[in-house]
Image (cartoon, rainbow, N blue to C red):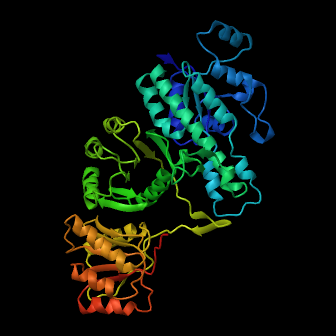
Amino acid sequence: MKKIQSALISVFYKDGLASIVQLLHEQGVTIYSTGGTRAFIEEQNIPCVPVETLTGFPSILGGRVKTLHPLVFGGILGKRNDEIHQQEMQQYNIPSFDLVMVDLYPFEETVKSFANQSIEDESPIIEKIDIGGPSMIRAAAKNHQDVLVVSAKREYQLLLEILQSQNGQTTLEQRRFFAIKAFDVCTAYDTAISNYFNQTSINSPFNQEKRVLRYGENPHQTANFYGNLNEVFNQLNGKELSYNNLVDVEAAIQLIKEFNETTFAIIKHTNVCGIAQAQSVKAAWDLALAGDPESAFGGVLVCNQTIDLSTAAAINDLFFEVLIAPSFETAALTLLQSKKNRIVLQLKEFELPIVQTKSLLTGVLSQASDIGNFQEWKEEGGRVSNQEEQENMKFANIVCKHLKSNAIALIKNKQLIGKGCGQTSRIDALRHAIEKAHQFQFDLQGAVLASDAFFPFDDCVKIAHKNGIEVFIQPGGSIRDADSINYCKENNLVMVITGQRHFKH
């Protein structure tokens, strides 16, 4: 255990700081600080040593240089058990800092504030590139043998609890834990800055980080990825991601980010072959797999909740390429890592691009992303849908949105029970969806049907109705919409028109 006797504090976010500095003062800790943080501490009627007093140098160059000084970094990096270090620190009157509380300028927040603006002067963003902060954080983390580093406001509460329960003392294990967090903070910060410059330079993917892939869609094709996958996920297990893996992973992530309720999905060649919502992850997995256990082989699995041990055990015997989830129970991850080539990805919080691009011929296509479910909700059938049918239609329409066109999705109780995708006619897509449902003995009575585009004729509605389907959702827009609508009215069927087509090629 090491007693905190002096602290260097310089933070942008001061929420929760008052109680910490008050406790440090009560425990006899000498506090050094700068600028706005020093003013904040003094407002709490707590004595504070200005860093300028220590260095003999004021804050200069508009605040760009205030802590970059040997007397500051010597106090952070000096080893307490190194005789030469201690002699030099005494010779140059360098104090020892036992606690370093430093966070970073809000670079990402500043970039986001300019997201919808055309920036001619990017100096407000440039000035939020912190120099001294990351340097002090890295120095303190490096010297965690002697120094406790707190690098983000989310760690304030834990620091306060340690100070209270251990009377201002810390263990090596605790200091190492905070050091790991500090290096993560610096890595994420540097990545955000790099991404900003990549995105605002000449709009070419070749200005971004290059990752050489094993091969392309086929072994005789070379392939590269340009971009930063680290901002999307952490790879926890498995071989290097391939071209096809990445294409399917992108499709899986786009799909799963549509849902808040517990959802599990299986992707095969960018199409959904199984998806379900349920009260538990295990139940959602069971239902998703049951929708098409044949196609699930070799697929990409994705879930929006923590993978627990029971779910991991259930999927462990299935051959799959990739599993994606926001988190994993420790025992579940250990089990999943038992097969060395199995790719396990921990999905991070990140925003999907609002613009999609695709290389084509001699140039690049660009379009706004397909955001949303429906623009309107018009009940045009023979009866109005009930709440359960509405929930299933909304779910079905999103699933259909993520199938290749022409696409039909059959949903029952928030479970995909049949789908037709990538067909050259809508009626072929419907026939394929019905055949899939029958293949796995699903009863279509009570199912809902979603179509990614309008019905050009009433043949799809008639065939679906003949097979027991009474609820339909589609965008409308055909000059012969009335044919399908009238059939629904005559047969007391639900027909919802959304006004939003979801082609996916």
- Which residue is nearer to you in this view: 240 or 474? 240
- Which residue is nearer to you in this view: 35 or 104? 104
Viewed as shown, does residue 296 lie left or right of 224? left
Viewed as shown, does residue 289 lie left or right of 142? left
In the rendered picture of this protein, how many numbered marks are placed on residues?
Answer: 0
x and y percentages locating residue 275 in the rendered image: 32, 60
Q: Is residue 400 above or below residue 122?
A: below
x and y percentages locating residue 56 in the rendered image: 78, 25
Identify the residue shown where x is 57% and y is 27%: 141
Viewed as shown, does residue 26 lie left or right of 75? left
- Which residue is nearer to you in this view: 161 or 130? 130
Q: Is residue 154 above or below residue 406?
A: above
x and y percentages locating residue 482 in the rendered image: 37, 93
- Which residue is nearer to you in this view: 60 or 421? 421
Viewed as shown, does residue 21 lie left or right of 115? left
x and y percentages locating residue 180 in the rendered image: 51, 30
Snapshot quadrant of residue 408: bottom left
Identify the residue shown where x is 44% and y is 68%: 404
Residue 111 seen: yes
Residue 170 seen: no
Q: Is residue 502 above or below residue 293?
A: below
